Amino acid sequence: MMSLLLDNKPCFTKEATVKRAAETSKKKELYLITRTAAGDEIAFEALYSMFYKRLFRFIYHTTGRFDLVEAVINDVMYTVWEKAATYNQTCRLSTWILGIAYNKSLQHIDLQKSKLDCEAIDEVDEHLLPRGADWVERLETENWLENAFEVLSVEQRVVVELTYYNGLSYQEIAKLMKCPENTVKSRMLHARKKLASTLETNTLYMVSPGTVRDD
């Protein structure tokens, strides 16, 4: 009898489980954005919490500035609150929100560039200056990709972030960035070449973990 019950027990594959989880997440997101559009502050807070970490990483990778992240997140989510009713489900909610984050990040980058043009070099925050001798040490103690993002242009960082961290397709990224799909592919190609070159270059200075060449 036990064998018969086991034989009739539904078999759930990993792919099926992942698919169900994705569908559940999509329904939850749709519910929250719908309620947000209706002025539900609790739903908005839940939406804020759901996307906070993803936005934090995306905005930091795009701007390269920790000090800008919170301001941009607030700007993005304020826009989500104001424009929630305009979300038409033609793309994933995450793509729509990341598209807002991309535009807001560029706006803040332009604003900061304008401010820096008016500042003396000794007034610029230390973390804005080019990294020097501590580069290899940082490679050893922090996630390499986080640091390597600094060699990429804003557009290249965005493509890498959206592809590897958010799972967007080139077609979705092209729509978000308002550029041809081939442009996205080209940016990814150049980004991968830069990252590979950076890894190879800096590896030459590493003899063993925690050791840097003197020559």
Image (tube, rainbow, N blue to C red):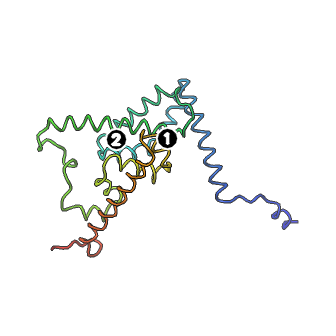
In the image, which is nearer the foreground, mark 1 or mark 2?
1
Element type at mark 1: helix
Q: Is there a contact, CB below 8 Å, between mark 1 and mark 2?
A: no
* Residue 81 to residue 56: above or below: above
Figure quadrant of the C terminus: bottom left
The amino acid type, in three-letter code, at marker 2 is Val
| Mark 1 or mark 2: whose residue is earlier in sequence | 2
Q: Nearer the viewer, residue 206 or 102?
A: 102
Q: Which residue is mark 1?
A: 95
Q: Quadrant of residue 66?
A: top left
x and y, in percent, of residue 123 in the image: 13, 41
Say which residue appears at 31% left-offset and 63% top-offset. Answer: 141
Residue 142 position, x and y percent, is: 33, 60
Instruction: Place residue 110 in its image quadrant.
Output: top left
Picture coordinates of residue 130, whole percent (x, y) = 19, 53
Q: Residue at x 16, y 37 (%)?
A: 117
The image position of residue 140, as x and y in percent, is 30, 65
- Residue for point 54% across, 40% down: 92
Residue positioned most to the top:
39
- Three-letter amino acid code of the residue under disc 1: Thr
- The reply, left or right, for residue 118 in relation to residue 144 is left
36 vs 130: above or below: above
Quadrant assignment, res 107: top left
- Residue linked to disc 2: 69
* Left or right of 171, for residue 4: right
Q: Identify the residue at image location x=81%, y=64%.
A: 6
Q: Local crowd at mark 2 within 10 Å, few (<14), some, or many (≥20)?
A: many
